[in-house]
Image (spheres, grey):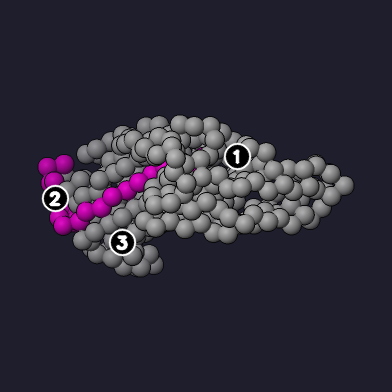
Amino acid sequence: MKTTISCAAMLTVLCASTGAMAGHTNELLEADLDGREQVGSDPTQRLVGDPDGKGKGYVFGIDGDPTTLCYNVIVDKIQLVPVTEGMMAHIHEGVRDTNGPVVAVLAGPEDTNAADCLTEGEAGKFPTEEAGIVQRILHNPELFYINVHNPDFPSGAIRGQLKNTIHTHDDDATGAGDFPTVPMNLTALVYSGTAVEIFWDRSTDDDSQVVAYSVMRDGQPVTSVQGNSFFDDGLMHGTTYEYSVVAIDNMANESAVSESLSVTTDN
């Protein structure tokens, strides 16, 4: 995953509200992974994947970033080996019962689980280099499927077609339980009249993994990052900016917005 993810507008499949906060309805793409969903060269041969293999895939977008795709792949009862030994996962383009090309390279779930975020333009992550591929996947899930490969089944052990599901959050959520904790203790270093860096404590999540942070400047999303800092340049001399941060986990749950931090650049 890239350290900094540039963004422009809210991804409609992720959040129904314009602000990044807990308490809204998400559309989360899901895939039920099964060895019996694999498709071989002979269409009459139905069992070409792992007959015992099962899994679940989740795909969603990042608040304010239409070019970033996040995912979580969970597998069970299939051969697990290190990625260097042939454990792979991809999003392919193709409807059910057909095979298609790889459009997104995911991490291999070598420990039964893999989660990360990918950004268009990131080397090796979107092989077709199609501009807008993230939005096309999110808006047309039925045209794409997740495939997990291992040495036992190099063509695919388990597979599942993506589909839309509704993911509802309580409006009074505060970052506990199913939500990441609110990012705390925002601090800043002012480097010049045009550059500052924002830092915060990492968030945690009882049941999921925090995969990204959405950073807002003056109430508007400006970027998403994987780590707990953000370098912001191209600012104006002697100007005060308000920064806040939202944590996002691998189930598309968002924390509440952190307390804001005022930062003034040098004159």
Q: Looking at numbered disc 3 in the image, what kind of residue is underneath it?
A: Thr
Disc nearer the start of the sequence (3/1): 3
**Circle 2 Cα neighbour tier, 10 Å, few/some/many (<14 / 14–19 / ≥20):** few
Spot occupied by residue 154 in the image (x, y as percentages of width and height): 27, 58
Closest to the observer: 105 or 258?
258
Q: Which residue is mark 3?
A: 112
Closest to the observer: 174 or 70?
174
Spot occupied by residue 203 in the image (x, y as percentages of width and height): 51, 56
Closest to the observer: 158 or 190?
190
**Circle 3 Cα neighbour tier, 10 Å, few/some/many (<14 / 14–19 / ≥20):** some
Task: Name the residue located 39 percent from the left edge and 52 percent from the top edge.
Answer: 177
Q: Does residue 122 appear in this view?
A: no
Task: Name the residue located 63 percent from the left edge and 37 percent from the top edge.
Answer: 219
Looking at the image, residue 109 sits to the left or right of residue 193; the answer is left
Disc nearer the start of the sequence (3/2): 2
Task: Name the residue located 74 percent from the left edge and 48 percent from the top edge.
Answer: 263
All told, the count of numbered labels is: 3
Q: Is residue 223 above or below residue 209?
A: above
Q: Looking at numbered disc 2 in the image, what kind of residue is underneath it?
A: Leu
Q: Which residue is mark 2?
A: 47
Q: Which residue is mark 1?
A: 221
